[in-house]
Image (spheres, rainbow, N blue to C red):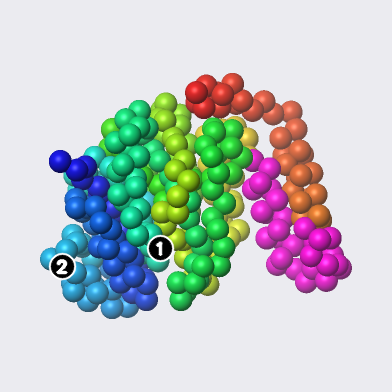
Amino acid sequence: MSALVSIVTPSLNQGRFLRRTIESVLAQGHPRIEHIVRDGGSTDGSREILASYADRIRWVSEPDAGQSAALNRGFAEARGEILSYLNSDDVLRPGAVEAVVEHFRRNPECDLVYGDADYIDEEDRVIGAYPTAAYSFDRLAEENVVCQPAAFWRSRIARRVGPFNEALRYAMDYEYWLRVAEAGGRIEHLPRTLAASRLHPRAKTLAERRQVLREIFAVCDAQLGRVGRTYFIGLWHDRLSAGTGRWLGGPLRWKRVYQAMGYLHHKWYHRGRRSRRSLGARRAL
């Protein structure tokens, strides 16, 4: 019998995109998928959308303590041996679940697999590629190369790792991947486009970028004892973008300035610190 795949969708007032998310799951060719939607008590018509799929998904709409809490409630109900979560403005690409199930079948030692992903806009147009890369722990410590909507993991590693950290609002996925690695989970990259991550003005990753970076710094400090240079470059890009930036000149000079500032800030931040490279090397095995 084919593996049961459980996909949890946390949602709050995403009625504009919710139907597209659900349809992308229903369109998967794999015969055994349970889609669990945890809505946080939306007031934008999401409940009516969910009710129209009542015979094909499992859903509940009630106030919750945030995205991580919604995920934990959803996964507590999940029965699948393969797990994933798909935010209510993202979508799966056709054939994604079948590809993941086949990868796990061929690679029984794999605990978490992630694929490539597109960035899409509000109208589903592809506007770029998510920066995934082949897995190594050192690469994951430098930046989050695991695209969340394109990531799937086994229930066995979920039991070992425990629930998502409900104190986190933005970086709960990154912190979870780091815990999977720390628990000895085998992480693999599948070079196939499995999902699309939507960028729009209300998306937390754009609308609350400074808070996102602050939380990533805290997660890296706690889990790794260091923060990757990529995040400092992103911080300075955000800081300089918030100003006029006119004195920086053209695009090439602009890029050189924020990269240089990020490099210097990274060096200063870690002065006198000892990173956990040996731990990272052990996790990568």
Position of 92 with respect to 209 (left or right) is left
Residue 112 percent coordinates (x, y): 39, 38
Label 2: few (<14), some or many (≥20) within 10 Å? few
Q: Is residue 152 above or below residue 149?
A: above
Residue of label 2: 54
Q: Are marks 1 and 2 in contact (CB under 8 Å)?
A: no
Position of 176 with respect to 102 (left or right) is right
Q: Residue furthest left?
A: 55
Which mark sits nearer the N-terminus, 1 or 2? Answer: 2
Q: Residue at x 60, y 26 (%)?
A: 276
Whether residue 116 is visible, yes or no, is: yes
Residue 281 percent coordinates (x, y): 56, 24
Residue type at mark 1: give it.
Asp
Quick one: 42 or 80, which is closer to the camera? Answer: 80
Q: Is residue 247 magenta?
A: yes
Residue type at mark 2: give it.
Ala
Residue of label 1: 90
Q: Is residue 25 above or below residue 121?
A: above
Residue 154 percent coordinates (x, y): 31, 38
SS at circle 2? loop
Q: Residue at x 56, y 27 (%)?
A: 280
SS at circle 1? loop
